[in-house]
Amino acid sequence: MVSEEEIARGIPLQRIGRRVDIANAVLFMVSDAASLITGTTLVADGGSVFTGSGFDRIAALMGKTPKL
């Protein structure tokens, strides 16, 4: 089994996201601060999308092939 620490090493922020991280992103998107934002995707992944260290890397660490 792959440890959380091993997965976190592949994430630019060096930690796995928590529920509160997603909750904060949702709260921002429904707030007045986001009133001008339309038609976009908010990615809350600790920077993994920019480094290619997302689900494919985690699946590889676990010895599995990702299913899309």
Image: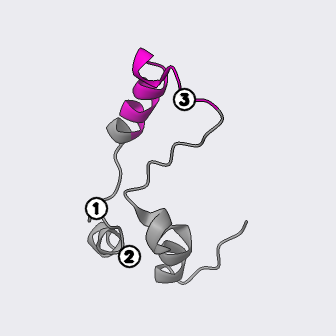
Q: Name, please, the residue furthest toward the front.
A: 36
Q: Nearer the viewer, mark 3 or mark 2?
A: 3
Q: Residue at x 33, y 36 (%)?
A: 20
Which residue is denoted by mark 2 in the rendering?
A: 2
Say what secondary structure mark 1 lies in: loop
Q: Are marks 3 and 2 in contact (CB under 8 Å)?
A: no
Query: Dot 1, crowdedness within 10 Å: few (<14), some or many (≥20)?
Result: few
Residue 13's disc is: 1
Q: Position of residue 68 (x, y in %)?
A: 73, 65
Q: Earlier in the sequence, mark 3 or mark 2?
A: 2
Q: Residue at x 48, y 20 (%)?
A: 30
Quarter residue 22 falls in: top left
Which residue is denoted by mark 3 in the rendering?
A: 37
Q: Residue at x 40, y 61 (%)?
A: 47
What residue type is disc 2 on?
Val
Along the viewing direction, whichever of 19 and 39 lies nearer the viewer: 39
In the image, which residues are magenta?
22-38
What count of labels does the image hold? Answer: 3
Q: Are marks 1 and 2 in contact (CB under 8 Å)?
A: no
Dominant SS type (magenta): helix
Q: Name, please, the residue furthest toward the right.
A: 68
Q: Is residue 35 magenta?
A: yes
Say what secondary structure mark 2 lies in: loop
Q: Position of residue 5 (x, y in %)?
A: 26, 70
Determine whether, in the image, residue 63 is placed left or right of residue 32. right
